[in-house]
Every structure is written in C-alpha cells, then in structure tokens.
C-alpha cells in the first residue's frame, strides 16, 4: 500500500512539472524574426523597403517601427526631413544587436538614404 501511494505521488509530481514549450505552439513565431527601426525627429517622413515591399511612416518626435523577416536581407531606408533638425536612425535586429545608431543634422527637405544588412545569424 505504501509503495502504491509513493508511486502515485511520483507520477503526479512528474506530470505536473511538465510544461508545454510555447515557442512551437505558433509556427510563424519561430520562422519570422522581428527587428526594430526607431526614428527620432521633430517632423520627418520615413520610407523603407523590406523584401520588395515599400512602407511609409510620418514621424513626429519618435517612432518605433517593427519589421519582420525570415532570412538575410538589406533594409533600405529613406528619411526626408521636413525642417532643419537632428535625426537619429536606430536599427536593431531580432537578436537585439544594434545594426546602426546614427545621429545627424539635416536641413529642411534633405533626404538621407541608407541600406542596412540584416542577418539571421
């Protein structure tokens, strides 16, 4: 009897300590990686291209723009300054590595084009 109770407790403890790995519950989370494009400016427009898709965002003060990717690619950005100001462009990959952190002064109407290599390794 004592052996059966001990065995029953062992099984209950073993089963309750198992947990499901949530990383595999959504296959898209495993495949897609999320990076971050942060633009800090008073008044500017950001155009960027990811895997032959163009996006555009108007920025006042600061904007965090997430981008998603599955493999290596080049993130192409174009920042248009709508007034004389300092603009910071920060790019972080899915591993938290800073790809670029650039602060520069821009004149009204000045366009800054950059290309950043984003890798999955």
Image (spheres, rainbow, N blue to C red):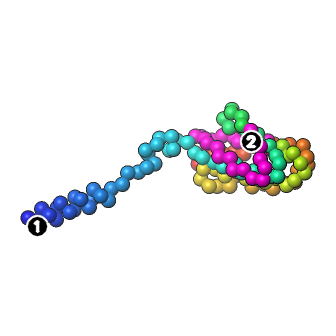
Name the spot of residue 109 as percent of width and height, x first: 90, 43
Residue 105 versus residue 71: which sits nearer the camera?
Answer: 105
Secondary structure beneath disc 1?
helix
Crowding at label 2, few (<14), some or many (≥20) Cα neighbours within 10 Å? some
Residue at the spot 27% in from the left edge and 56% down from the top edge? 15
Q: Residue 94, which numbered label?
A: none
Residue at the spot 68% in from the left edge and 47% down from the top edge? 65
The residue range painted magenta reads: 56-79
Figure check: 55 above or below 39 = above
- Specify whether 46 is left or right of 12: right
Q: Main secondary structure of the magenta part?
A: strand
Q: How many marks?
A: 2
Regarding residue 85, the answer to whether it shows in the image is yes
Name the spot of residue 102 as percent of width and height, x first: 78, 54
Residue at the spot 47% in from the left edge and 41% down from the top edge? 27
Q: Which residue is disc 1 drawn over?
A: 2
Residue 47 placement: quadrant? top right
Regarding residue 100, the answer to whether it shows in the image is no
Task: Examine the structure image and report whether residue 119 is included in the region drawn in magenta.
Answer: no
| Tag in front: 2 or 1 | 2
For marks 2 and 1, give the CA distance: 69 Å
Q: Spot the residue most to the top.
A: 52
Q: In which quadrant will I find the N terminus? A: bottom left
Q: Are the residues at dot 2 and dot 1 in contact (C-beta closer than 8 Å)? A: no
Q: Which residue is disc 2 drawn over?
A: 57
Task: Examine the structure image and report whether residue 77 is included in the region drawn in magenta.
Answer: yes
Secondary structure beneath disc 2?
strand
């Amino acid at each position: 009897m004592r052996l059966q109770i001990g065995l029953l407790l062992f099984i209950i403890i073993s089963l309750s300590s198992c947990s499901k790995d949530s990383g595999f519950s959504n296959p898209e989370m495993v495949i897609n990686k999320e990076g971050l494009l942060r633009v800090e400016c008073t008044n500017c427009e950001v155009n960027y291209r990811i895997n032959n898709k163009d996006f555009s965002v108007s920025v006042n003060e600061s904007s965090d723009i997430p981008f998603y990717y599955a493999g290596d690619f080049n993130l192409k950005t174009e920042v248009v300054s709508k007034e004389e100001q300092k603009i910071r462009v920060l790019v972080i990959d899915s591993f938290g590595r800073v790809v670029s952190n650039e602060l520069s002064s821009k004149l009204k109407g000045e366009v800054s084009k950059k290309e950043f290599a984003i890798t999955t390794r």
